[in-house]
Amino acid sequence: MRIRTKVLAFAAGVALAASLHAAAQGSDRDEYVVQQSRGAPTVSLGGTVVPYKEVTLAAQLPGRVKSLAGIEGDTFKEGTLLVQIDDNELLAKRNAALAQLANAESQWRNAGVQYNREIFSPQSKQNPGGMGMPNLFDQMFTRPAESFFGQRSQGAERSADLYSSGARIEQARNAIVQAQSEIRAVDAKIRDARSVAPFDGVIMKKFVEVGDTVQPGQPLLAYADVEYLQIVVEVPARLRPGIQDGMMLQAELDVGGQVVPVRVAQIFPMADAQRHTVRVKFDLPQGVSAPGMYAKVLVPDFTAPAREAPVIPTTAIRYNGSLPAVYVIGKSGEPELRMVRVGENLSGGFTTVLSGLSAGERILRNPPASISAGWASSEPRPKR
């Protein structure tokens, strides 16, 4: 009985060791079962990488370019002076307007003094005709007689004098307002002679140099924010229903063939009347491209019939020159190299296979560089 127990224990130990060895071999070889995917096909649309914000600074008044802040590629903070147009003539006009303002204020003060004088010492009661008895006779008899017979009205004269003094005050006040308005107009032109950076950005292109004479509306600088970039794509109208705000898609950059995720940032509300396309902007990750570069965006085409294709990890693909291949686990359990035709790259590090693999087959997820295997074919070889 004891011998039988020992034999059974030995057999169990051998079986356990064998299973651990098999598990260890399986762990050394990371396998992946080919999955079948079903989805809408995609269309590759070309676009251009553009800055998130871009402005063209233009001249607002005629003059000579006095200074430029830098050259193409220089970076500046918001509020930095970029272009200065000569403003000596404007400064002279401002000084003249300040002199007019000082004269108007002086006239306004003088008109106020004259108005107070008319109140406390009316001009109509002053007697220019002599002194002594003649003056007293005029005040006691002549002026009352003139008022009695209707030849003169002292009240009307006093009202007219007060109104005239008040009118001079109003005229002086209006002259002050006019001079202040001229100063503000000149200040606005002086501000227009200075072009400052509207945001943190880079000079993309210069259109003038120091000493050039410019006219209103003439471009001076192209200025842009290149920290954040976008791809502008003209999407055919039939593909527009498959794009929504905030949707994540994939884009392939022209330089290096790098595939990066992009997000739908803006869909223009109106289609082009001639080309029947809708402009769409996609946000790019930072630091992956530069303005003016070419890029392709994979846009889903829901108008086409859905297709089924095997999906494998991108790390499983090995290239023999320019031909892609994968290591397939054969019937003997050994890896065999098989040529495949790859499709588009998917999110999460996967790639579709157009031909060469079927769903359910096992492949090496990340074959090591030291692996060696024979060639395998997805189709039976013809008999000789």
Image (tube, rainbow, N blue to C red):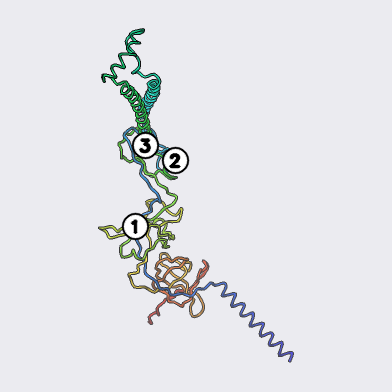
- 151 over 180 or under it: above or below: above
Q: Earlier in the sequence, mark 3 or mark 1?
A: 3
Please state if 31 lies on the left or on the right of 88 as rendered: right
Under mark 3, the amino acid is Asp
Amino acid type, label 2: Gly
Q: Which residue is mark 1?
A: 268
Q: Which residue is mark 2?
A: 79
**Would you say residue 88 is visible in this rendering?**
no
Q: Position of residue 213 (x, y in %)?
A: 31, 33
Considering depth in this image, is 157 or 262 the residue closer to the camera?
157
- The residues tagged by marks 3 and 1 sit, at their Cα atoms, a distance apart of 32 Å
**What residue did someone put label 3 on?**
192
Residue 234 in the figure: left or right of residue 322: left
Q: Quadrant of residue 208?
A: top left
For the residues bearing labels 1 and 2, Cβ distance under 8 angstroms: no
Q: Secondary structure at mark 3?
A: helix
Q: Position of residue 73 (x, y in %)?
A: 42, 43
Label 3 crowd bin: few (<14), some (14–19), many (20+), radius 10 Å: some
Q: Is residue 276 visible from the viewing direction of this image?
A: yes
Residue sitting at x 44%, y 40%: 79
